[in-house]
Amino acid sequence: MAERNQNLWDRQQNKKAKAKKDRAKARHFEKDEGAQWEGGESQFEGARLGIIAESRQKTFSVMENDEYFHCKLESGLDKELSKHLVVGDKVYFDLEGEEDGSILGRQDRKSTISRLRGDSTRYSEASLETHVIAANVNDAVIVASAKDPEFHPRFIDRYLIVCQNGNVEPIICINKSDLTTERHPVLSFYRELGIRIVETSTLTGEGIDELKNLIRGRIVVLVGNSGVGKSTLINSIIPGANLRTMEVSEKKGTGKHTTTASNLYKWDEDSYVIDTPGIRSLGIDNIEKSSIRFFFTEFEKFADQCKFRDCVHDHEPECEVKNAVERGEINVYRYESYLRMLKEY
Ligand code: GDP
Ligand code: ZN
């Protein structure tokens, strides 16, 4: 009898081990999406559910109800899988001691912030192969400064592409509002699109509460060019976050094997800000030139009527997009911003 039970136990163990291996294998070969280690609660019954708050190569800090656990991947899982875990990922884990745990699987992602690469061929396929740097982000606060550095629409348009691609809602934040009362005319176009805009000054405190109200109850990232005041803003939203300075993250970024730490900060109930050096300098450098046009969705209805099917709306004759710009039916700043993007890459 005892022997029989022992066999049953063995078999169960083997089944568990096989399932582990299969999950890892599927994950490994099917590359990024839809593999078996992703799944609903039923697959990971009894496991805890947390959110990756910090990722350092193969070890992760997982937050569950304000508590942090130091986690590694479950031993049977392919270690490659740890490359597919980023800050913001919701993971199932088991505790192995008071503060340590092992990660069993990942929930499907609702949204992503990614570096973009590859190309697309149609407006409807404006989704690209990506290198994900944060997951389950609700909003991206696209920070620009009213002045110093100078405001350029194309900086905002780049990040709008990143949001569009990753299913993340944009909020435009014009920081350093204390430096000038002048505002770029393109802002009214973004307002027409329904994009939320907030003007802030970390110096006078203007707009900080308004920004907090917009991002309360959400998971957000701040993106934008360097020097616009992202770290200062985060520090005023989360006193004590003590963000790395530019100098430090630059030093960290040199050399091949240095780690790039990403962090998720909780600043209010259900309210998080993600900070990663990767996000701070996010670009769209890897998008094929010929694909950029597909992210300017307002071009779409005119592009059908361009003389050339592969018209990139630059120098081509009989380009309806250019005509629409001249008629004022496409915002001229958006079009200029598009041309700048074409030339930059
Ligand atoms: P980051 O590179 O986007 O993280 O920018 P930082 O937060 O490092 O800020 C760059 C510089 O802008 C610093 O010298 C800040 O003190 C300054 N700064 C940040 N916010 C404001 C603001 O609202 N008004 C003014 N006048 N300066 C600011
Ligand atoms: Zn055209």
Image (cartoon, rainbow, N blue to C red):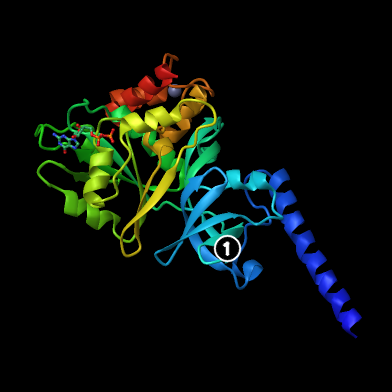
Image quadrant in which the C terminus is located:
top left
Residue occupying image coordinates x 32% and y 32% = 246
The amino acid sitting under disc 1 is Phe
Q: Quadrant of residue 332?
A: top left
Residues 296 and 286: in front is 286
Residues 339 and 81: in front is 81
Q: Is residue 147 above or below residue 108?
A: above
Q: Is mark 1 within 8 Å of ligand 1?
A: no
Q: Mark 1 points at which residue?
A: 93
Residue occupying image coordinates x 27% and y 42% = 172
> x, y percentage for residue 186?
23, 33
Which type of secondary structure does the marked residue at label 1 adopt? strand
> x, y percentage for residue 146?
18, 32
Q: Is residue 305 above or below residue 267?
A: above
Q: Quadrant of residue 199?
A: top left
> x, y percentage for residue 103?
59, 58
Residue occupying image coordinates x 45% and y 41% = 261
